[in-house]
């Protein structure tokens, strides 16, 4: 697959991992590394959203904390970079609006938007999905409980399955349970330094 993509393209090949990253965890990193490696992507951009379109905002902490944690999580991986486009724009983070901007800024780049199989089934509800498909190639990461199929042109890849979620991490911290080995040590240090997620939800 890697040779096929690299052999048919002359533009830069860049992946995007979107999400709230509240907080970023090892599942995010393993997924990004797996996709980046399998597809031979030059970069994978971690792009925290300002206000997710389909998610309650009451449990999303300030953007400055999420940016800081992503920076710490990806530090040391030359393939990974932080993308601030949605945080800097503010408001509801519609992927279509973001990709219009990124394509204008980087006309020499093909973008691969990485999502889990659970999100693939929700693609019909994405804002301007038909127009968005003209701007980005979706990459679906397979999950055993979700079929690797879609009516949209999704590129499917395998990745080690880590049953970790940000909500699980927030819950464990609020219950004074350890999250060591679920998040990078540098992220855990930041959470402890800032006293994040201590309130029970």
Image (cartoon, rainbow, N blue to C red):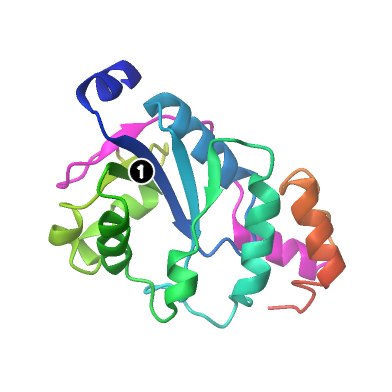
Q: Name the residue beneath numbered marker 1.
A: 146
Q: Quadrant of residue 35?
A: top left
Asked if 25 appears above or below 99 in the picture, the reply is above
Asked if 119 appears above or below 8 in the picture, the reply is below
Q: Is residue 150 left or right of residue 106?
A: left
Residue 87, position as x, y percentages in the image: 49, 71
Q: Residue at x 31, y 34 (%)?
A: 156
Q: Is residue 140 left or right of residue 72?
A: left
Q: Residue at x 46, y 39 (%)?
A: 43
Question: Does residue 171 belong to the magenta stretch?
Answer: yes
Q: Is residue 162 among the parts visible in the rendering? A: no
Q: Is residue 121 left or right of residue 180?
A: left
Q: Nearer the viewer, residue 106 or 68?
A: 106
* Range drawn in magenta: 148-175
Question: Does residue 79 belong to the magenta stretch?
Answer: no
Residue 148, position as x, y percentages in the image: 29, 37
């Amino acid at each position: 697959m890697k040779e096929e993509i690299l052999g048919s393209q002359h533009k830069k090949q860049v992946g995007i991992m979107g999400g709230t990253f509240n907080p970023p965890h090892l599942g995010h990193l393993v997924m990004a590394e797996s996709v980046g490696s399998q597809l031979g992507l030059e970069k994978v951009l971690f792009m925290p959203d300002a206000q997710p379109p389909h998610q309650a905002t009451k449990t999303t902490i300030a953007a400055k904390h999420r940016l800081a944690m992503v920076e710490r999580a990806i530090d040391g991986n030359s393939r990974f970079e932080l993308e601030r486009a949605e945080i800097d724009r503010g408001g509801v983070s519609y992927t279509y609006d973001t990709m219009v901007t990124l394509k204008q800024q980087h006309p020499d780049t093909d973008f691969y938007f990485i999502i889990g199989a659970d999100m693939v089934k929700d693609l019909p509800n994405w804002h301007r999905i038909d127009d968005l498909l003209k701007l980005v190639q979706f990459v679906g990461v397979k999950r055993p409980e979700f079929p690797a199929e879609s009516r949209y042109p999704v590129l499917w890849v395998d990745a080690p399955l880590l049953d970790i979620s940000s909500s699980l991490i927030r819950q464990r911290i609020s219950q004074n349970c350890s999250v060591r080995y679920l998040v990078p040590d540098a992220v855990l240090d930041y959470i402890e330094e800032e006293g994040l997620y201590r309130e029970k939800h």
